Amino acid sequence: MTNRSHSVDSAAGWVVVAATAISTFAVFGVVYSFGAVFTAIRDEFGVGKGQAALFFSITTFIYFILGVFTGRLADRYGPRPVLLVGAVAMGAGLFFTSLVNNIIVGYLTYGIGAGIGVGCAYVPMVAAVGGWFERDRTKAMGVAVAGIGVGTLVGAPLAKQLVLSYGWRTTFVVLGIGSAALLALASLGARRPPTAGTQEAPPPLKLLLRDHRFTWLYTSMTFLSAGLFVPMIYLDDYLEAQGKTGGALLIGIIGATSVVGRLALGAVGAKVDLMGLYQSCVAVLGASYVIWIFAGANYTMLVIFAVCMGTAYGGWIALSPAVTAYLFGPVGLGGVLGALYTSAGIGGLVGPPVIGVVIDSTNYETAIGLAIVFSAISLVLLRTATRASAPTTADAVESDDDVQPTGAAASAWLVPSPQGGMRLIRR
């Protein structure tokens, strides 16, 4: 049903922004606090770093892959019912994880529960924000995903304190109850965009895959994600290996400064070269890891690393939906974002366990160097995506035999728009 009582860029849209901030706070406050319980879980099950990291990696893979479906479901049915499913999954998954005595079962309960929770909260809600705004879209998305940073700032130190006081099992119970309650609260403000029901359906995936900009951007995000989550998982363990504490606080600092990156760079992105700013964030992300290598156990330098990494990471997160809307248009943004974010799922599934194996086999410095290599490759691929040409109208029509749109797009094709991005044309 179309929400005709409000228009884009209205006060109602900012209610959806607030709901999105709450939902991202809830789910990422849990997932990005995993580093605070990482060592306790590794000791509990007597496994290596790579095996323990699979808790996080499987979760990341599931929620990014699931975004393909939840984004399209939200486009069709609205974000509220999808978000409520996520609340149930998150609470149940963390509760059952607190009971497991077998690490394989833990992979399933934590990975599926938290994975569905994030998958139902992130892409659908961010896509809803994109549909509520035109003039202030970049700014609104920056505010909406700031919940990720605030969640990390609060979640990581809180989880560490809970682990030290009550153990990791009770910690998961507390986090499960809290995150489920917040998602239920956020659902009250999860409204469909005013154009829902009248806008075109998302472009068919085969059509996206014919767009070289999409494939290069997809590959770039895969490599960046392979190294992106390393601090979230290993920073606390890194300091404990050096006989020091404070790693959870550093993860919190990454979250806090990512809020600055989201808000500041999200607002700046509406006024400057969006793609240039996006590339700068990727470049600074990789460069910040150099600081980590030279920091050793120097806490001041590690704080500097956390600030640089968090700010660049926040900008990358805030600008990613805006870049997607710029390149491919806001039509069916949930579906397009869901397809694109599967790249982060692949990178997140492979990267952290590989990094963990490298740490166990060599040392942290070598592993961090590998993360730098991943970021450098990502930057090269991103620049290639920026320079790639959009598919022509002829290319779209040529795909007629291979792609059969359905629903609202049954008689339309995705072609370059004079205003940037893509638009659907009628046959």
Image (tube, helix red, strand yellow):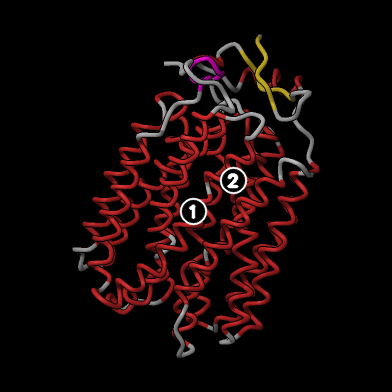
Write down the region rendered in magenta. 194-200
| Residue drawn where x is 74% and y is 25% of the image | 416
Determine whether 154 is above or below 3 in the image: below
Magenta span has 292?
Answer: no
Which residue, as the protein is rendered here, is positioned at the far top?
Answer: 427
For label 1, the residue is 148
| Residue drawn where x is 74% and y is 44% of the image | 274
Left or right, residue 387 beside residue 181: right
Whether residue 250 appears in this view of the structure is yes
For label 2, the residue is 142
Determine whether the residue tagged by mark 1 lies in a helix, strand or loop.
helix
Whether residue 203 appears in this view of the structure is no
- Classify the position of the C terminus by image quarter: top right
| Quadrant hosting residue 257 | bottom right
Magenta span has 198?
Answer: yes
| Quadrant hosting residue 401 | top right
Q: Amino acid at mark 2?
A: Gly
Q: Earlier in the sequence, mark 2 or mark 1?
A: 2
Give the overall secondary structure of the magenta segment: loop
Residue 180 point in image, percent of width and height: 29, 48
Q: Amino acid at mark 1?
A: Ile
